[in-house]
């Protein structure tokens, strides 16, 4: 079974704070993704990584950065959180072309 | 811009009926197609994948692909209230990329 874990299910932060969202997968997979999901807008790709220290921008990278120092861990960083970054954040990894998602982190920025 | 279109719904069907969910995509070179189910507040989970034209059946679920028409569908037979969820269609372009383009989802409601 694929296991993708995310550090928090719910998170409340203040505007301007630096926020770290962690994603860990346990199967040594190379490809990992960060999405955000908002009502009416669907899933939107923020960043993805296909190997350690490698990263590629997705469709909406503005206001975010990522870090992949180890293969199993892919971190999403909000440098200075803003209210429009309130959203559900989903991490995924790939096995044989199929993306498997973590449980998600619901972030509220006040 | 690669696009995946789905009716947002809600699609309401009575318990025991067949639910039909549809998806069209713009990238003619797409090769792999996926249906995910997402319960409210949860993350998407894979139901079906389909790669070649025709039908693929798995229990009560049947995925149908028509590459010429750029159309993929999901049929749910004997719909149950537990099938009430949002169904996401996802499309993968040709070889060399693991990115998916997702539709915005169709909300299905199965009425007991």
Image (tube, coloured by chain):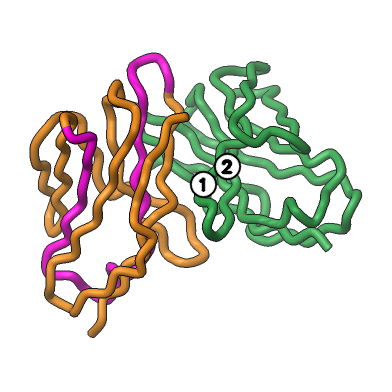
- Residue A90: give x, y in percent of width and height: 56, 47
Which residue bears the numbered disc 1?
A43
Q: Looking at the image, tell me whether mark 1 or mark 2 is earlier in sequence order.
A: 2
Spatial CA distance of label 1 from label 2 is 6 Å
Label 2 crowd bin: few (<14), some (14–19), many (20+), radius 10 Å: many
Which residue bears the numbered disc 2?
A35
- Give the magenta part as a residue range: B69-97
| Helix, strand or loop status at disc 2 | strand
Are marks 1 and 2 in one subunit? yes
Label drawn at residue A108: none
Identify the residue shown where x is 56% and y is 51%: A37
- Based on the picture, tell me whether residue B17 belongs to the magenta stretch: no
- Residue A45: give x, y in percent of width and height: 56, 37
| Helix, strand or loop status at disc 1 | strand
A5 relative position to A83: left or right: left
Identify the residue shown where x is 71% and y is 44%: A21
Q: Which color has been applied to chain A in this rendered view?
A: green
């Amino acid at each position: 079974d694929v296991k993708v874990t995310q550090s928090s299910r719910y998170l409340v932060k203040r505007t301007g704070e630096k926020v770290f969202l962690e994603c860990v997968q346990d199967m040594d997979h190379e490809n990992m993704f960060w999405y955000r999901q908002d009502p009416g807008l669907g899933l939107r790709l923020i960043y993805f990584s296909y190997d350690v220290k490698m990263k590629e921008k997705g469709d909406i990278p503005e206001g975010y950065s990522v870090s992949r120092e180890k293969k199993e861990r892919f971190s999403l960083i909000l440098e200075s959180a803003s209210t429009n970054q309130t959203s559900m954040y989903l991490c995924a990894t790939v096995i044989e072309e199929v993306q498997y998602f973590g449980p998600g982190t619901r972030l509220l920025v006040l | 811009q690669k696009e995946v279109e789905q009716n947002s719904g809600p699609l309401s069907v009575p318990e025991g009926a067949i639910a039909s969910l549809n998806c069209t995509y713009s990238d003619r070179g797409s090769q792999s197609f996926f249906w995910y189910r997402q319960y409210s507040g949860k993350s998407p989970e894979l139901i079906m994948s389909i790669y070649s034209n025709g039908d693929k059946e798995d229990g009560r679920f049947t995925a149908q692909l028509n590459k010429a028409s750029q159309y993929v569908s999901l049929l749910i037979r004997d719909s149950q209230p537990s099938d009430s969820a949002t169904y996401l269609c996802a499309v993968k372009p040709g070889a060399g990329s693991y990115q998916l383009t997702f539709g915005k989802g169709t909300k299905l409601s199965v009425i007991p």
